[in-house]
Image (tube, rainbow, N blue to C red):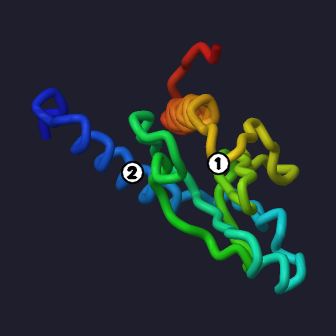
Amino acid sequence: MDLKNMNTEELEKLIEEANKELSRREKTLVVYVHDCKNDSDYHLNKYKHWSKRVLSVDTTKTNEHAFRGEFLNVRSEHELPIGTIVVEACGDNIRAYKLTSSGKERFAEAKRKSMSDFIDKVAEEVLFAQVQKDGGETIKT
């Protein structure tokens, strides 16, 4: 496989597939739950809720479709590897978390109608997490 001859979309797909396989091999898992998991049915039905394990980010998009990965059930617990990046929404509020051994740590927050900076922050964290997972070094700005 010659990476230099692959286009950007093919490379992103390869990274996504590689991340899925690496995640399957991970042994250290933590429990993730959406912030609204235990809220009333009224709340969960009134506002749009979703949660996604982010494997890659398309920074050319300016809405929630920028995040590539697997959707997580908002009403369930999920065991995910430490270092996983999760984006979740409750109505117009959207938040990004990095899973750590002590739970989830919020690193970005935005409103759905102004997500450009948020998307860039998530893309940076996803890239940083991938480099860390690969054992490489990077300077985080």
- Residue 84 versus residue 29 in the image, above or below: above
Residue 72 drawn at (x, y percent): 61, 70
* Residue 132 in sight from this viewpoint: no
Q: Which quadrant is home to the C terminus? A: top right
Q: Which mark is drawn over residue 112?
A: 1
Residue type of the residue flagged with mark 1: Arg
Residue 66 rendering spot, x and y as whole percentages: 47, 46
* Quarter assignment of residue 4: top left
| Numbered badge on residue 16 | 2
30 relative to 45, above or below: above
- Position of the N terminus by quadrant: top left
For this orientation, the residue located farthest to the bottom is 41
Label 2 CA crowd tier, 10 Å (few <14, some 14–19, many 20+):
some
Foreground pick, 107 / 80: 107
Q: Is residue 31 shown left or right of residue 73?
A: right
Crowding at dot 1, Cα within 10 Å, few <14 / some 14-19 / many 20+, comes out as some
